[in-house]
Image (tube, rainbow, N blue to C red):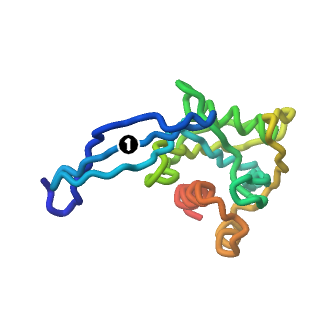
Protein backbone atom coordinates (compact mmCIF):
# COMPACT_ATOMS: atom_id res chain seq x y z
CA UNK A 1 0.00 0.00 0.00
CA UNK A 2 1.26 3.48 -0.92
CA UNK A 3 1.61 5.45 2.33
CA UNK A 4 1.12 8.69 0.40
CA UNK A 5 -2.44 7.77 -0.59
CA UNK A 6 -5.51 7.20 1.55
CA UNK A 7 -6.85 3.67 1.69
CA UNK A 8 -9.15 2.43 -1.07
CA UNK A 9 -12.73 1.39 -0.33
CA UNK A 10 -14.40 -1.74 -1.74
CA UNK A 11 -18.09 -2.04 -2.57
CA UNK A 12 -19.62 -4.53 -0.14
CA UNK A 13 -23.24 -4.11 -1.25
CA UNK A 14 -24.99 -2.17 -4.01
CA UNK A 15 -28.77 -1.73 -4.21
CA UNK A 16 -30.95 0.42 -6.43
CA UNK A 17 -32.58 2.98 -4.14
CA UNK A 18 -34.56 4.91 -6.78
CA UNK A 19 -34.87 5.17 -10.55
CA UNK A 20 -35.39 8.84 -11.42
CA UNK A 21 -35.60 8.69 -15.24
CA UNK A 22 -32.37 10.59 -15.98
CA UNK A 23 -30.36 9.00 -13.19
CA UNK A 24 -30.48 6.11 -10.74
CA UNK A 25 -29.77 6.50 -7.05
CA UNK A 26 -27.74 3.61 -5.67
CA UNK A 27 -27.24 2.89 -1.99
CA UNK A 28 -23.75 1.43 -1.68
CA UNK A 29 -22.08 -0.03 1.35
CA UNK A 30 -18.31 0.43 1.19
CA UNK A 31 -15.57 -1.11 3.33
CA UNK A 32 -12.22 0.67 3.80
CA UNK A 33 -9.34 -1.72 3.01
CA UNK A 34 -6.96 -0.44 5.68
CA UNK A 35 -9.12 -0.99 8.76
CA UNK A 36 -12.46 -2.51 7.70
CA UNK A 37 -14.54 0.57 8.54
CA UNK A 38 -17.84 0.45 6.66
CA UNK A 39 -20.25 3.16 5.55
CA UNK A 40 -23.35 3.60 3.42
CA UNK A 41 -23.28 6.18 0.64
CA UNK A 42 -25.70 7.29 -2.05
CA UNK A 43 -24.37 7.56 -5.59
CA UNK A 44 -26.13 8.99 -8.65
CA UNK A 45 -25.47 6.85 -11.71
CA UNK A 46 -26.13 8.73 -14.93
CA UNK A 47 -24.90 8.86 -18.49
CA UNK A 48 -21.80 10.83 -19.36
CA UNK A 49 -22.31 14.41 -20.51
CA UNK A 50 -20.75 16.67 -23.11
CA UNK A 51 -20.08 20.42 -23.23
CA UNK A 52 -19.34 21.97 -26.60
CA UNK A 53 -16.89 24.81 -27.01
CA UNK A 54 -18.03 26.12 -30.39
CA UNK A 55 -15.90 28.93 -31.82
CA UNK A 56 -17.00 31.12 -34.73
CA UNK A 57 -14.61 32.42 -37.42
CA UNK A 58 -14.85 35.78 -35.58
CA UNK A 59 -13.36 34.13 -32.45
CA UNK A 60 -16.61 34.16 -30.50
CA UNK A 61 -17.77 31.35 -28.23
CA UNK A 62 -21.31 30.09 -28.72
CA UNK A 63 -23.05 30.05 -25.33
CA UNK A 64 -26.62 29.33 -24.23
CA UNK A 65 -28.67 30.96 -21.53
CA UNK A 66 -31.35 28.80 -19.95
CA UNK A 67 -33.40 28.40 -16.81
CA UNK A 68 -31.97 25.79 -14.42
CA UNK A 69 -34.42 24.00 -12.14
CA UNK A 70 -31.93 23.29 -9.33
CA UNK A 71 -31.05 26.95 -8.74
CA UNK A 72 -34.27 28.46 -10.10
CA UNK A 73 -32.06 30.92 -11.99
CA UNK A 74 -30.84 31.55 -15.51
CA UNK A 75 -27.43 30.13 -16.36
CA UNK A 76 -24.97 31.08 -19.10
CA UNK A 77 -22.99 28.05 -20.24
CA UNK A 78 -21.62 26.17 -23.24
CA UNK A 79 -24.24 24.09 -25.06
CA UNK A 80 -24.27 20.42 -24.20
CA UNK A 81 -26.18 17.51 -22.82
CA UNK A 82 -26.42 13.80 -22.27
CA UNK A 83 -24.34 11.32 -24.24
CA UNK A 84 -26.60 8.43 -25.19
CA UNK A 85 -25.43 4.89 -24.35
CA UNK A 86 -22.77 3.86 -26.86
CA UNK A 87 -22.64 7.31 -28.48
CA UNK A 88 -19.26 8.87 -29.27
CA UNK A 89 -18.71 12.07 -27.20
CA UNK A 90 -17.72 14.08 -30.28
CA UNK A 91 -20.82 13.04 -32.21
CA UNK A 92 -22.97 13.73 -29.16
CA UNK A 93 -21.42 17.18 -28.89
CA UNK A 94 -22.07 17.97 -32.55
CA UNK A 95 -25.68 16.76 -32.16
CA UNK A 96 -26.27 18.85 -29.02
CA UNK A 97 -24.68 21.94 -30.59
CA UNK A 98 -26.92 21.74 -33.64
CA UNK A 99 -30.10 20.94 -31.66
CA UNK A 100 -29.62 23.67 -29.07
CA UNK A 101 -28.12 26.49 -31.17
CA UNK A 102 -28.46 25.68 -34.88
CA UNK A 103 -24.67 26.02 -35.21
CA UNK A 104 -22.57 23.44 -37.04
CA UNK A 105 -18.83 23.30 -37.59
CA UNK A 106 -15.78 21.29 -38.51
CA UNK A 107 -12.62 19.98 -36.92
CA UNK A 108 -14.33 18.74 -33.77
CA UNK A 109 -12.10 17.08 -31.20
CA UNK A 110 -11.89 16.34 -27.47
CA UNK A 111 -9.83 18.75 -25.41
CA UNK A 112 -10.50 17.20 -22.01
CA UNK A 113 -13.00 15.94 -19.48
CA UNK A 114 -13.91 16.30 -15.82
CA UNK A 115 -15.81 14.49 -13.11
CA UNK A 116 -18.86 16.71 -12.40
CA UNK A 117 -19.01 15.81 -8.69
CA UNK A 118 -17.00 12.71 -7.76
CA UNK A 119 -18.51 12.67 -4.25
CA UNK A 120 -21.96 11.64 -5.50
CA UNK A 121 -21.91 11.31 -9.31
CA UNK A 122 -20.39 8.40 -11.23
CA UNK A 123 -20.19 10.06 -14.65
CA UNK A 124 -17.77 12.17 -16.66
CA UNK A 125 -18.30 15.31 -18.74
CA UNK A 126 -16.36 15.55 -22.01
CA UNK A 127 -15.29 18.87 -23.56
CA UNK A 128 -15.48 19.05 -27.34
CA UNK A 129 -13.93 21.92 -29.30
CA UNK A 130 -15.60 22.72 -32.64
CA UNK A 131 -14.07 25.44 -34.78
CA UNK A 132 -15.41 27.68 -37.55
CA UNK A 133 -19.03 27.16 -36.52
CA UNK A 134 -21.85 28.83 -38.42
CA UNK A 135 -25.58 28.95 -37.79
CA UNK A 136 -27.11 26.86 -40.56
CA UNK A 137 -29.67 24.59 -38.88
CA UNK A 138 -33.03 24.97 -37.20
CA UNK A 139 -33.33 24.62 -33.43
CA UNK A 140 -34.65 21.31 -32.06
CA UNK A 141 -35.21 21.75 -28.33
CA UNK A 142 -36.19 18.88 -26.06
CA UNK A 143 -39.64 19.21 -24.45
CA UNK A 144 -38.32 20.96 -21.33
CA UNK A 145 -35.69 23.13 -23.03
CA UNK A 146 -35.86 26.77 -23.99
CA UNK A 147 -32.49 28.34 -24.68
CA UNK A 148 -31.24 31.64 -26.00
CA UNK A 149 -27.99 31.54 -27.97
CA UNK A 150 -25.39 34.23 -27.26
CA UNK A 151 -21.98 34.88 -28.82
CA UNK A 152 -19.14 36.05 -26.55
CA UNK A 153 -15.63 37.09 -27.55
CA UNK A 154 -12.96 34.59 -26.53
CA UNK A 155 -10.98 37.56 -25.20
CA UNK A 156 -13.78 38.33 -22.70
CA UNK A 157 -14.02 34.85 -21.17
CA UNK A 158 -11.66 35.45 -18.25
CA UNK A 159 -13.50 38.65 -17.27
CA UNK A 160 -16.85 36.86 -17.55
CA UNK A 161 -15.61 34.16 -15.19
CA UNK A 162 -14.12 36.73 -12.81
CA UNK A 163 -17.38 38.73 -12.80
CA UNK A 164 -19.39 35.53 -12.18
CA UNK A 165 -21.38 35.91 -15.37
CA UNK A 166 -20.66 32.20 -15.86
CA UNK A 167 -21.29 30.18 -12.70
CA UNK A 168 -22.18 26.68 -13.92
CA UNK A 169 -19.31 24.58 -12.55
CA UNK A 170 -19.03 22.21 -15.50
CA UNK A 171 -19.20 25.15 -17.90
CA UNK A 172 -16.39 26.78 -15.93
CA UNK A 173 -14.31 23.60 -16.26
CA UNK A 174 -14.96 23.53 -20.01
CA UNK A 175 -13.96 27.18 -20.38
CA UNK A 176 -10.79 26.63 -18.32
CA UNK A 177 -9.82 23.77 -20.65
CA UNK A 178 -10.52 26.02 -23.65
CA UNK A 179 -8.43 28.88 -22.22
CA UNK A 180 -5.54 26.49 -21.57
CA UNK A 181 -5.88 24.79 -24.94
CA UNK A 182 -5.91 28.05 -26.90
CA UNK A 183 -3.38 29.80 -24.63
CA UNK A 184 -5.68 32.74 -23.95
Q: Is residue 151 left or right of residue 18?
A: right
Q: Is residue 168 visible?
A: yes
Q: Position of residue 55 (x, y in %)?
A: 70, 49
Image quadrant where residue 134 sits: top right
- Residue 147 vertical position relative to residue 83 in the rendered view, above or below: below
44 in relation to 176, above or below = above
Relative height, residue 179 to residue 63 (above, below): below
Q: Nearer the viewer, residue 11 or 107?
A: 11
Q: Position of residue 125 (x, y in %)?
A: 54, 45
Residue 5, image x and y in percent? 22, 60
Q: How many labels, in total?
A: 1
Point 76% across, 35% down: residue: 98
Q: Is residue 107 visible?
A: no
Q: Residue at x 77, y 51 (%)?
A: 64
Q: Quadrant of the C terminus?
A: bottom right
Given residues 72 and 92, the one toward you in this image is 72
Element assignment for label 1? strand
Q: Tell me the residue at 63%/56% (across/down).
A: 171
**Along the viewing direction, whichever of 132 and 158 lies nearer the viewer:** 158
In the shown orientation, is residue 101 left or right of residue 2? right
Q: Identify residue for label 1.
A: 28
- The 10 Å Cα crowd at callout 1, few under 14, some 14 to 19, many 20 or more, is some
Residue found at the very far top of the displayed protein:
86
Residue 9 in the image, given as x and y percentages of width and height? 26, 48
Seen at 81% across and 38% down, the residue is: 102
Amino acid sequence: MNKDLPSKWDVKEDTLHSDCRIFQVHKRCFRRQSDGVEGEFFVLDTNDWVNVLAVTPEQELVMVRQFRYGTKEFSLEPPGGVIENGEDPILAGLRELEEETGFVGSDAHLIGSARPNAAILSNRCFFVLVQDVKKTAELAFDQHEELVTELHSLQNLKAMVENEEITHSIGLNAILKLILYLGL
